[in-house]
Image: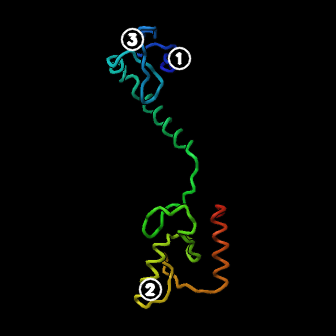
Amino acid sequence: NFEKDESKMMCCASCGVAEVDDIKLRKCTACYLVKYCSVKCQRNHRPQHKNECKKRAAELRDEILFKQTESRDLGDCPICCIPLPIDPSKSMLIACCSKFICKGCCHASEVRELEGNLQPKCPFCRHPRTNNDEEREWNTLMVKRAEANDP
């Protein structure tokens, strides 16, 4: 593109003035593709530059997003919508619905069940809980799969 060639030549994209000791060119702050000698030149050139500028600015934002390191984001608790903590001891995987739930929501569910003298149920899907070895083994297996990102 012509605008990209102009930025390499170090001259104003609007009037063509070359960068020399007394004239300092400034890059477009959105796309960094073109340079201008003054605000007036930048305003005059804006109609021709606008579409390419928006496109390049979007590409730059995407590059920044994709360069970010992948965090150990478990997402949000499906009940309270608060981000799940990175510390695995502060959230738990529920086997019946395969959801990670924060300990706060699990605690609130347990308190509700105790105060109402209700049967223990899953805080998310309300499936009745069973306390047997098979379910504990299943929970352990599911946690290992979830930590390994195994669907």
| Percent of width and height locating residue 145 | 66, 66
CB of mark 2 within 8 Å of CB of mark 1? no
| Type of the residue with mark 3 | Cys
* Residue 130 tag number: none
Lower position in the chain sequence, tag 3 or tag 1: 1
Q: Residue at x 47, y 82 (%)?
A: 110
Q: Is residue 130 above or below residue 89?
A: below
CA gap, disc 3 to disc 1? Answer: 15 Å
| Percent of width and height locating residue 17 | 42, 9
Q: How crowded is mark 2: few (under 14 residues within 10 Å), some or many (20 or more)?
A: some
Q: Which residue is drawn at 42% across and 25% down?
A: 28
Q: Residues within 10 Å of mark 1 (few under 14, many from 20)?
A: few
Residue occupied by mark 1: 8
Which of 115 and 45 lies nearest the eye of the viewer? Answer: 115
| Type of the residue with mark 2 | Glu
Lower position in the chain sequence, tag 3 or tag 2: 3
